[in-house]
Image (cartoon, rainbow, N blue to C red):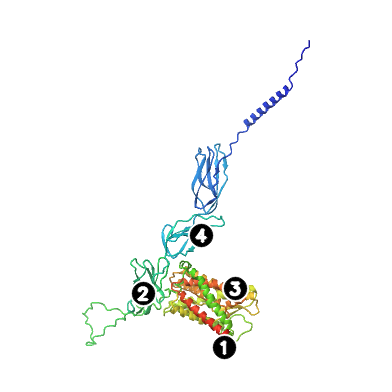
Amino acid sequence: MRTRTAHPTPGAPSRVRRWAVALALGALTSAVFTVVPAQPAAAAAAFDIPTSDFVSASSVTITGSKDVGSTLVIRRGGAVVCTVGDTAAETFSCSGLSVPNGVVEFTGDETLADESVEPMTPLTLRVLAAPTINGAGSTVTTTGRFSGTAEPGADVELSSTGPGGTTAHSCPAALGNGFWSCVVDLPSGPYQVRARQSLASLGPESSAFSGAVSATIDRTPPSRPTITSPSPGTTTLSTVTARGGGERDALLQVFVTGGLACETTVTASGSWACPLQWPRPGTWNVQALQRDAAGNFSAASARVEVRYEPPAAPAPPAPDPGEPDAEPSPDESPTQPAPTPSLPGAPNAPPPLDPVTSNWGTATGFGGSLPTAAEVIERGGWLLAPLAGLAYLLLLALPLRWFATHVRPRSIVPRPRFTGRNRLGEVEEPPTRTLSPVLVAAATLGGAAIIAALSGGIDAEVRYLRLTAAIGLGLVALNIVGVLLPARIAGRVARVRVGVRLLPGILLAALVLALGSRFGELQPPLLVGVLIAAAAVLGSSRRARAGVAVAQTSGVAALAMLGWAAHDLLTPSTGFWMSLWSETAAAMALGGLGSLLLLLLPIGPLPGRILYAASRPAWAAVALVSASLVGAIFASGPAFPLVALLLLSAAFGAVLVAITVWVRWVAPVLR
């Protein structure tokens, strides 16, 4: 019988070994977790992803999610703007957070239940709020001009809702200081106007619209005011009250022989009253001008001519012829002491001041009609600027050039020379001078100053001596700083010699313009202040000659604009020195603007002829821009007859063209 021997089951030891290894690994893992603390769960706080990262308002609401048991701190630019302390919440919301224009970043930290802090992924937004529009929430009356503040460089768009529906208006970009201004072309009537802006650096989106302005657009000028008092004739009263009628709530100004005497507001009943004081005995013209609430100017009222004659002093009573030698008895006492005669050196009351010799510090009104930059925009002068520029180019400059080319060479006559070749600078050979050039220059400038003072009317008072001195200072600055200095600098840069020529013949043009301004009552007056012209010597390159011409015209333009800005800052002026500097600035502005148009004419020794010869398109562009600028300023004056001057210029240009056509084509055929 076989005995069966038991053998171990195959694979049993291997299973035992595997179980032993598993038990050892479990023990090791348990030991590790016992020594190393458990790590917290990852933070779940996050900002909600917005549908668009662009915000068109000045405040924003941000939302998101968070862990249960945690708190949040939200920051913008390092400053805490929101704190979420509700540990049980799983979401959060922070509303009304102020945000500036530009790229804004929000950051946050989540504090978990175990006091650990986890940062949140930042949220970046692009913000552009609505611009401001002056008068928002109220009612304004305007000719169509609106203004406000926006982000510097932003494009501004207006939306007007009125009788004709809603219209969008594109406006110039905001200036560097954020100021924007826009003139809309809308018929008169009531409108609701809003503004919004866009900034290319932030993206293509536009901001929301601003609050609405209830605007009444009024483009109808008021009728000319009336003057009912004083009446034409003679008066012995040194002070009178001018009265008349006008448009309700209009600003009314009263002028005495061209000078602003007083201003007031027309009452609700349409009447006005304003006190006047005659400057001195003589004949005076009284006129009134009004500007309505929208800024439209009326025509001047009819003139009222008044002659002021102060009453004669009463003659002393004649002695009684019956008792020539009678003397009062010692016991007779007069009821009133006799007046003590005023003796030299006696402590008596001084006599009244004589207005002819005591008003050194009184304003003359010179330059008072020169509009400010804000008034040019408000009165719509920029709208008329292109018309003035084209009129200068087509009616004056080009006909004069044509006339000078074809007619003048056939009618040249010898001219008298006061200083050899009328040059004050370097010339190629010493001229024979009959008079000192310095004397001629001083006399020419002095004559120009007197002529300029005559443009507004002068009287026998010492304040007009101050005015003449101020105009003289302004003309010296224009000729030396505006013409001579830039031309010499340009000559040094181009390494050419520069000659300076005195132009005393311009005095005739200055006199014509001054008399035309005086008797035509142009406000502001037309003046010419530049009496010299600089040029590179013969043989210089065309580029060098053009550079010298550009330098002096640019210098005159810059000095005129500087005087314009300075006059705005110095007005109104009181006292001798303030009035002197204000009148000097006005002379620089008025004389420089008028001279700029003269210098750009392409005739004679003027810089305009050099620019015309160098490049006709460049000359035309410079002349057009310059004339447009001057036209915008002068057309915004209170009483500047732009239409009449355009008609006169058209007639002048037509005469020049007719003469040129006759000499150039008709006369040769007839001969």
Q: Residues within 10 Å of mark 3 (few under 14, many from 20)?
A: few
| Alpha carbons under labels 1 and 2: distance apart | 66 Å
Amino acid under disc 1: Leu
Horizontal and vertical percent position of residue 237 = 32, 77
Q: Which mark is residue 105?
A: none
Element carrying mark 1: helix
Kindly identify the residue that appears in the image at 64 percent across and 31 percent down.
32
Q: Are marks 1 and 3 in contact (CB under 8 Å)?
A: no
Q: Is residue 28 left or right of residue 59?
A: right
Residue lying at the far bottom of the rendered structure: 671
| Alpha carbons under labels 4 and 2: distance apart | 49 Å
Write down the residue under mark 3.
617
Amino acid under disc 3: Pro
Residue 439 seen: no
Write down the residue under mark 2.
277
Q: Quadrant of residue 660?
A: bottom right
Q: Are marks 4 and 2 in contact (CB under 8 Å)?
A: no
| Alpha carbons under labels 1 and 3: distance apart | 36 Å
Write down the residue under mark 4.
156
Amino acid under disc 4: Val
Q: Which mark is residue 670?
A: 1
| Alpha carbons under labels 2 and 3: distance apart | 54 Å
Q: Is residue 542 left or right of residue 379?
A: right
Q: Residues within 10 Å of mark 4 (few under 14, many from 20)?
A: many
